Amino acid sequence: DVKVTQSSRYLVKRTGEKVFLECVQDMDHENMFWYRQDPGLGLRLIYFSYDVKMKEKGDIPEGYSVSREKKERFSLILESASTNQTSMYLCASRGLAGVEQFFGPGTRLTVL
Amino acid sequence: GQQLNQSPQSMFIQEGEDVSMNCTSSSIFNTWLWYKQDPGEGPVLLIALYKAGELTSNGRLTAQFGITRKDSFLNISASIPSDVGIYFCAGQLDDKIIFGKGTRLHILP
């Protein structure tokens, strides 16, 4: 059974903290994505990666960075968390020839 | 930039009713996708459409790729309680994919 896992389902952090959200996929997919999901705004793409050590900005990259040191792992980093980054974060992966993105269960992050 | 207009934003229906939702865009797409997100989970692909005019069914779900390549609809027949969730359309052109804002489906007992 194919799987995308995210390190935490719920996370509470304080303003100014550095936050790491980890995502691992076991499908040997080349492409990986980070989205945030907010009520009424749908899924918005933060960053994506086509391959190891490659990264591309999505639609809302400000305040975030990413790391892809290994093919199976894509990390989202909040350098200095702010309250407006309270959200649901979804990771997804996709194979090179495929259209379907496989999503993880999400991490609900609250920044106090 | 490209945008998808998904409607309705939310629906309240009785169990057993049919449901219809759609997405429109000012841009054309090569592929239309419909995802469902159960509460507390990530979205899961329901149906993928690859050709203008294509009509595809998956059980009680039917989706169509509009002939202009700028729209798609999803119908659910005879709704059941487990249909509750958020439905997202997504349009894809080359490597770029754009998601609609979602339709939240509520089913009244």
Image: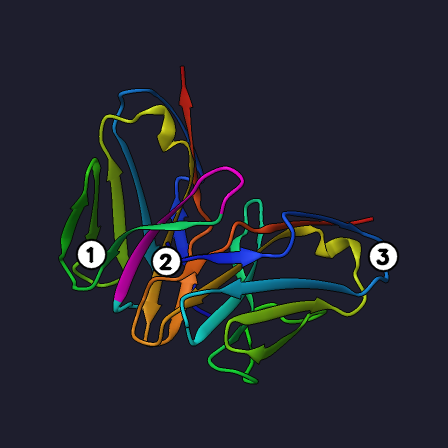
Closer to us: B29 or A103:
A103
Q: Earlier in the sequence, mark 1 or mark 2?
A: 1
Where does label 1 land, which residue?
A: B66
In the picture shown, does residue A23 fall above or below A112? below
- The residue drawn where x is 22% and y is 31% is B77
Q: Is residue B38 left or right of residue B77?
A: right
Q: Are marks 2 and 3 in contact (CB under 8 Å)?
A: no
Where does label 2 land, which residue?
A: B90
Q: x, y percentage for residue B69? A: 23, 63
Question: For residue B95: magenta?
Answer: no
Q: x, y percentage for residue B61? A: 23, 40
Q: Is residue A112 left or right of residue B107?
A: right
Q: Secondary structure at mark 2?
A: strand
Task: Residue type at mark 3: give it.
Answer: Thr
Disc 2 and disc 3: Cα gap in Å? 33 Å
Where does label 3 land, which residue?
A: A15
- The residue drawn where x is 31% and y is 25% is B80
Q: Note whether residue B26 is visible.
A: no
Q: Residues within 10 Å of mark 3 (few under 14, many from 20)?
A: some
Subunit under mark 2: B
Are the residues under marks 2 and 3 on the same chain?
no
